[in-house]
Image (cartoon, grey):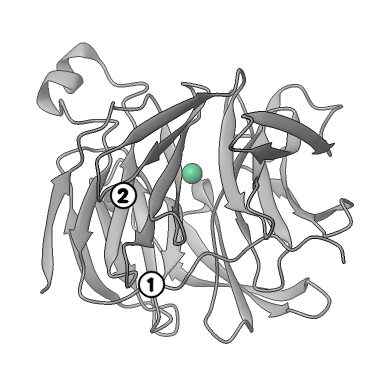
Amino acid sequence: MVNQQPEVLAVEPALLGEGPLWLPESKQLVWVDIEGKCIHMLSPGTGAQRVIMVGERISAIVPAEDGRLVCALQSGFYFLDLQKEGLEWIADPESDQPGNRFNDGKCDPAGRFWAGTMPLEGNEPVGSLYRLDQDGSVRRMLSEVRCSNGLAWNPDAAAMYFIDTYTRRIDRFDYDARTGSIGNRRAVVHIPPEQGLPDGMTIDAEGMLWVAFWGGSCVARLNPGSGEWLQRVELPVSQVTSCCFGGDGLEELYITSARTGLSEEQLQKEPLAGSVFRCIPGVRGLPANVYKLQA
Ligand code: CA
């Protein structure tokens, strides 16, 4: 049954909710609160919740093939052991840039972790997009990024989609799964100012993008081939940050939001700001790509 009317989940609102991830084996939704410096976990089936305090800004989490998570923290890439709640440092490509922090990240179809950075203040193009490979080495894949967001790969693993939020564009790259290289960057969707800013993104089984709009109170389904706006899920909060598919058949869409930066007056108008929402959009998602460890 298609139900595009989003429901709010009974979880503590985040200051800056982000990076939702569905773990199919444990049937859990995981997301981060970047400014709350923690990870939230929810089992929608039972309502069981868990919060893991990280102690610094955390902006992205991906599953690793051994059951751990790989995370992007302000001080770089880490493994997280969920049982021990222990962090193990992997690498920090921006140890010389204390004015930046990591932002969105995802794994590619071959199991490399991509995550980008942004300045803590302002929107100068001082961020980069990095690729963490299986051997723990890190490469800078893009530079002069203002606010790195919204990564997705298409179902046949031939294209990577990327959002640098302040460009108001969704860009497509040719992607080579074997080498992890990208090229032939071009804009496939231009976002008009009244839509807000494009933020986090996921992709469905039909290769259509689902993009969260910061300041736009919605998630929209976009066709990256034609640039057409296909579907829109309206939300009762303005700062919509990201989305992912979850549930048994990946038929549910989970949506994160933020309350940071809103005035008292705005918070009275949107008391659910920072909440996580869920709807049944009528199309299935793709399972999250997993970080592959070196054999
Ligand atoms: Ca984001």
Q: Amino acid at mark 2?
A: Ile
Residue where numbered disc 1 is placed: 285
Name above or below for residue 70 compared with residue 189: above
> Camera-side residue: 14 or 268?
14
Percent of width and height locating residue 178: 80, 80
Q: Residue at x 20, y 75 (%)?
A: 282
Q: Earlier in the sequence, mark 2 or mark 1?
A: 2
Q: Please give the label number shown on residue 45.
A: none
SS for callout 1: loop
> Camera-side residue: 206 or 295?
295
Percent of width and height locating residue 57: 59, 25
In this rendering, does residue 163 appear at all? yes
Picture quarter with the N terminus: bottom left
| C-alpha separation, residue under disc 2 versus residue under disc 1 | 13 Å
> Camera-side residue: 108 or 51?
51
Percent of width and height locating residue 211: 38, 59
- For disc 2, the neighbor class at 10 Å (few under 14, some 14 to 19, many from 20) is many
Name above or below for residue 183 compared with residue 3: below
SS for callout 2: strand
- For disc 1, the neighbor class at 10 Å (few under 14, some 14 to 19, many from 20) is many
Occupied quadrant, residue 161: bottom right
Residue where numbered disc 2 is placed: 255
